[in-house]
Amino acid sequence: MNLRSGRWYALNTTAALLCRELRTGGLETAVQAVKDRHPSVGEGRIRRDAEEMVQRLADRNLVVFETPEASTVPGTGPPIVAGTGSGRYRLRARLALVLVTLLLCLPFRWTLRAAAALRVRGRTAATTEEAAAMVHMIDRVAKHFPGRVACLEQSLAAVLTAWLSRRRLTWVMGVAEDPYRFHAWVESEGVPVLPAEEPGFSGYRRVLTL
């Protein structure tokens, strides 16, 4: 994910294999893994392609190598589905969606800075019950909102609703592989809070947390 533009980039199967092996075993391990999968390709070519791929990713600020422990499934507990909630967040949810529309018109790096500032200046961390009520209300209000409201807009609107309520939520973006899927959600007390059931949610891992 390019944090300046908000654009996602996906690797093909071979490049993803190279990155996984580079992270855990280094260049020679990565080269051998690809050679085992494609025995007809010369080792020298695989090594050159691997070095070129890493350089291109680094030049675009798209590669960050981390320990395997850092790539965990989302949250510290099973997701909470926001099935019900009171109407006390309705007006704040509507205002939050309008503000989100404006925020996402800005360069993405500015949107991230604004979201980070909201978290720093937020008051008390929202409980899971409060978070579920906010996410539920955003989901209800979104059905009648004239603009686009997908996971990015919904999750950021929940963060703004929390801020307007003198609370704080964690904004998370993540990715799942095979096939590649990109997602955004909020967390409270380390637990993801979702607007609806998502059977494949456990396949996501965090890329960005604010």
Image (tube, rainbow, N blue to C red):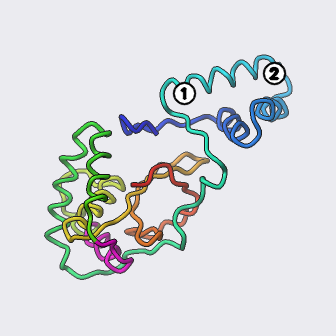
Q: Quadrant of residue 37?
A: top right
Tell me which residue sits at (24%, 82%) in the image: 86
Residue 10 percent location from the top left of the image: 54, 37
The residue closer to the viewer here, 43 or 149, is 43
Residue 84 appears at what percent x and percent y? 32, 81
- What is the span of residues highlighted in magenta in the rendered image? 124-138
Q: Which of the image's four quarters has the C terminus?
A: bottom left
Q: What's the residue at 72%, 18% (across, down)?
A: 48
Quarter residue 166 falls in: bottom left
- Mark 1 is surrounded, within 10 Å at the Cα level, by few (under 14), some (14 to 19) or many (20 or more) other residues, namely few
Q: Position of residue 25 (x, y in %)?
A: 77, 39
Mark 2 residue crowding within 10 angstroms, few (<14) / some (14–19) / many (20+): few
Q: Quadrant of residue 151?
A: bottom left
207 part of magenta stretch: no
Q: Amino acid type of disc 1?
A: Ala
Left/right placement of residue 66 relative to residue 193 reads: right
Question: SS for tag 1?
Answer: helix
Q: Residue at x 64, y 20 (%)?
A: 52
Q: Nearer the viewer, mark 2 or mark 1?
A: 1
Q: Nearer the viewer, residue 12 or 47?
A: 47
Left or right? Give the position of 53 relative to 118.
Answer: right
What residue is shown at x 32% (from left), y 46% (from top)?
112
Mark positioned earlier in the residue sequence (2 or 1): 2
Percent coordinates x, y for residue 17 in the rendering: 70, 38
**Label 2, label 1: how far apart the Cα atoms are:** 25 Å
Report which residue position mark 2 lands on. Answer: 41
Rendered view: 132 above or below 208: below
Q: Which mark is residue 58?
A: 1
Prevalent SS, magenta region = helix
